[in-house]
Amino acid sequence: MQRWSSFHKTPVAMETFITFKSNDPLISRYVHYYYLDLKPNNIVTEFECFPHYNNTLSLYRSHHYTPDGEIVYQENGTPCQIFTPVREKVLTVKQTGKVHRIVIVFHAMGIQQFYREPDFGVLNNSYNFFSTDELTDLFDGNDTDTLTHQLDTFLKSRYIAYENPLPEKAISEIFSNYEDFSVELLAEKLSVSRRHLNRVFKKNIGVSVKKFHEIVVFRKTMERKLFIRPEESFTSLAYQFNFSDQAHLNKTFDNFTKKSPTTFFKKGILLGSQDTFWHRIR
């Protein structure tokens, strides 16, 4: 595994990846972090992104999103806005040509405080989350202090408090008890049927309660290995997160990454100072 600082110029000339946090207490409740991705000399970059309980809104300065998922630079083109919901499969991202991208990483159900439009079952690249004038301002420079202020301001102007107690309580319970969890007990605690809980959860999150819990456990094992105990064995990691054994841990990583834990961490690149951890294909 490679570790990069919050500002890094990669072996490919002039690539920059910077993570930065909101300065607004209200926005910080719903936005995990922002990042700036610059590849002015890019020809083709392809990488794998892995399941996460957060979701993202990617803003590309001058790009076209093709039907097969390729993001292609267009000289004097228009911005491309892509919302990626919680997902359970590996997402392969292919960027062709120059890249100037700003990304908002929302906490689960965070985006609903600012937008009601997203369909949480599919990737959305057909909605204008930000106006043309706002995007012009955002792409005018690369100073992260300025970007932080702009993003905070633009999001806050859209803020309308959103409450949906059932999925919100379910998410809170999952994060509080992810090491010892069952959907049946959660439904009983929330006084609803398992079927109703799953239906509401999938509509508002994009995956079932069981799958969301599995993603949380997967990401929590990642966080421990990356940030807390890098030297910890996978056997110990399995024990810490209440897997039945290391084989169970291996199966979970295979389901979400198509790789063993050893290969997954060895090949991964930690970008910035948060939890963006990708495999670069080329």
Image (cartoon, grey):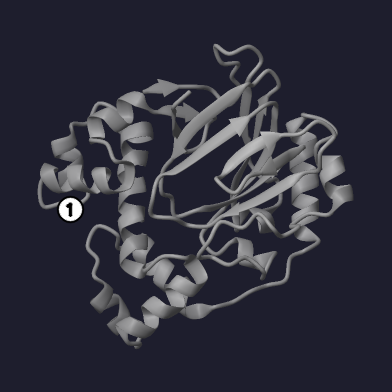
Q: Quadrant of residue 159?
A: bottom right
Looking at the image, residue 48 sits to the left or right of residue 116; the answer is left
- Identify the residue position indicated by label 1 in the image: 242
Q: In this view, which residue lies farthest toward the front?
A: 67
Q: Quadrant of the N terminus?
A: top left
Looking at the image, residue 189 sits to the left or right of residue 246; the answer is right
Question: Measured from the top left, where is residue 86 in percent x and y?
Answer: 47, 57
Looking at the image, residue 243 sits to the left or right of residue 201; the answer is left
Q: Does 110 appear above or below 57?
A: below
Residue density around tag 1, few if under 14, some if 14–19, many if 20 or more, within 10 Å: some
Question: Measured from the top left, where is residue 129 in percent x and y?
Answer: 74, 57
Q: Residue at x 30, y 52 (%)?
A: 217
Amino acid, disc 1 = Asn
Question: Measured from the top left, where is residue 94 in percent x and y?
Answer: 55, 35
Q: Quadrant of residue 266?
A: top left
- SS of the residue at dot 1? loop
Toward the viewer: 128 or 186?
A: 128
Toward the viewer: 69 or 173?
A: 69
Question: Measured from the top left, where is residue 144 in percent x and y?
Answer: 73, 33
Q: How many marks?
A: 1
Q: Residue at x 63, y 45 (%)?
A: 66
Q: Residue at x 40, y 72 (%)?
A: 170
Q: In this view, which residue lies farthest toward the right?
A: 133
